[in-house]
Amino acid sequence: MAFGTKAVSSGSGSIAIGANSSSSGSNSVALGANSVADGSTLSNAAYNPGSGSIAGVTPVGEVSVGSSGAERRITNVAAGSADTDAVNVSQLKAVRDGFNSDIKDLKGGIAAALALESAPSVAGKFTTYMGVGYYDGQSAIGISGRKTADNGRWSISGGVTASQQGKVGARLGFAKVWDDNHD
């Protein structure tokens, strides 16, 4: 089916709507003046940035709203929900914002690791250490304590840290000194 001056619909089950539009790909639709739906890229592998599976990798046709050099914007697109639906810019921005939040949390975790250092080991004493960490715009504080045996042969330590993102981390450790006498 073809509608419009010099519109051509030559593909099986294809539709061309608009002046000079052309739909030669099977099951394809060309919408708008000078739009081309020729199916030339249908055999190209679908873009998959990860290793997971994606839906709709074997298309049987295409819908074109323009042509190379005469692209059009599709406006007022509702948010997609099914795996094969189109997404709109607000959905992409939500994904970006989620990544940005995760990145801040990761940077805060690095700052927390930098802030948390073991307290020194002093025989028979309880020692503390307090530190501050900073990494790429994110900061954290940490405090740790250590109790070392009077003979210095073992110690137990622990610490907590908090990042500016409100994430809390903790550690606990035990150290034992071994020597040839096995005491």
Image: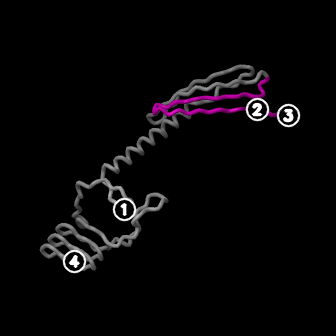
Amino acid on which the number 3 mark rests in the picture:
His
User: At 20% from the left edge and 77% from the top edge, which residue is drawn?
Assistant: 1
Residue holding disc 2: 176
Residue holding disc 3: 182
Residue at mark 2 to residue at mark 4: CA–CA distance: 82 Å
Viewer-proximal residue among 66 and 79: 79
Residue at mark 1 to residue at mark 3: CA–CA distance: 66 Å
Q: Going by the picture, which residue comes out furthest to the right?
A: 181
Residue holding disc 4: 9
User: Does residue 101 appear left or right of residue 143 in this picture?
Assistant: left
Q: What number of labels is visible?
A: 4
User: Does residue 152 appear left or right of residue 181 in this picture?
Assistant: left
Q: Mark 2 near mark 4, Cβ–Cβ under 8 Å?
A: no
Q: Going by the picture, which residue comes out furthest to the front?
A: 82
Residue at mark 4 to residue at mark 1: CA–CA distance: 26 Å
Amino acid on which the number 4 mark rests in the picture:
Ser
Q: Is residue 170 magenta?
A: yes
Please state which of the two labelled residues, at mark 2 or mark 1, is closer to the viewer: 1
Q: Which type of secondary structure does the marked residue at label 4 adopt? A: strand
Q: Quadrant of residue 81?
A: bottom left
Q: Residues within 10 Å of mark 1 (few under 14, many from 20)?
A: few
| Badge 2 or badge 1: first in the primary sequence | 1
Residue holding disc 1: 84
Q: Residues within 10 Å of mark 4 (few under 14, many from 20)?
A: many
Q: Give the residues drawn in magenta, as a range.
A: 151-179
Q: Quadrant of residue 83?
A: bottom left
Q: Which type of secondary structure does the marked residue at label 2 adopt? A: strand
Residue at mark 3 to residue at mark 2: CA–CA distance: 11 Å
User: At 64% from the left edge and 26% from the top edge, which residue is drawn?
Assistant: 119
